[in-house]
Amino acid sequence: MLTKLLKYEFKATGRAFLPLYGALLALALVNNLLLRLDGARFMQTHELSRISAAVGVMAYVLLIMAIFVLTLVVMIQRFYKNLLSEEGYLMFTLPVRTWQLLTSKLIVSMVWILLSCAVTLLSIFLMALGHGFSLGDLARAWEIFCREVFWRLDLNVLSILLQAFLTGLVVLAEFILGIYASIAVGQLFPKHRYLAAFGAFLGFGVIDQILTLLLLTGGGLFVELTELSISYMRFFNALFGLSTLYSLVWAAGYFLLTNYILSRRLNLE
């Protein structure tokens, strides 16, 4: 049933994102052409091409901002509208468990955020391609970066990248579930639900920051790691591992809290 929920969510949200992704990539190609024309000094319409290039870049930046704002808005809107508004009466009559509804929302939100980042990076590459930048330049830059950072510190490139990606996924899940938990807490209040949800989000954030500070300073964790006579690789392994575990605990807490509220304390009035 989770597969069907995911298919439904992707179909419903894809209508908003896919056209914007296409528009962003198309605009990147158009800007690439406009920048080429702007570089053609021999053109009689050079001033016009410069203005066109500036407008194109401005539109490109605004579109990127719109995509990420839309991603956040859709993430919040889909969760609230489907589960905590009148649509909730229908969603909670489906033969699925609450955790499956929550999991489907989480997975779809994570996918769209990651896709938004990937499409943005691809568009930047397309716009910069040919303007003193090529795939060869990218490969050489990566080689220099690896030599000066990873190899100099005797780090395993693949291991570091995989750990960083895994940690990033867990942190992203924690962020999304934190928003869901805040919205769920907010609906417990008969009045001022939005204000209560915002207050819960701030409260969770303050507690998170306090605990993080205590672990890094009061617990002496960071000091102990830095003072140990270990290699840089072991240091990063420990750092990524502890960061992932910490965020995983928070994500699990948010998930359990949200699941409990939606299962036992749901108020759709």
Image (cartoon, rainbow, N blue to C red):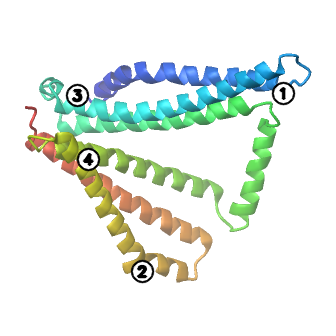
- Percent from the top left, x then y, of residue 192? 15, 41
Q: CA distance from mark 4 to mark 3?
A: 19 Å
Q: Is residue 174 above or below residue 210?
A: above
Q: Residue at x 23, y 33 (%)?
A: 80
Q: Residue at x 35, y 56 (%)?
A: 248
Q: Residue 198 got which mark? A: 4
Q: Residue at x 52, y 56 (%)?
A: 163
Please tell me which residue lies in front, 71 or 34.
34
- Viewer can see residue 219: no
Q: Residue 208 got which mark? A: none
Q: CA distance from mark 2 to mark 4?
A: 32 Å
Q: Amino acid at mark 3?
A: Asn
Q: Disc 2 or 4, which lies upstream in sequence?
A: 4
Q: Amino acid at mark 2?
A: Gly
- Percent from the top left, x then y, of residue 220? 42, 80
Q: CA distance from mark 4 to mark 1?
A: 48 Å
Q: Which residue is mark 1?
A: 39
Q: Is residue 28 above or below residue 156?
A: above
Q: Disc 4 or 3, which lies upstream in sequence?
A: 3
- Front of the two marks 1 and 2: 1
Q: Disc 4 or 1, which lies upstream in sequence?
A: 1
Q: CA distance from mark 3 to mark 1?
A: 50 Å
Q: CA distance from mark 2 to mark 3?
A: 44 Å
Q: Disc 2 or 3, which lies upstream in sequence?
A: 3
Q: Residues within 10 Å of mark 4 (few under 14, many from 20)?
A: some
Q: Residues within 10 Å of mark 2 (few under 14, many from 20)?
A: few
Q: Secondary structure at mark 2?
A: loop
Q: Which residue is mark 3?
A: 82
Q: Which residue is mark 2?
A: 220
Q: Disc 1 or 2, which lies upstream in sequence?
A: 1
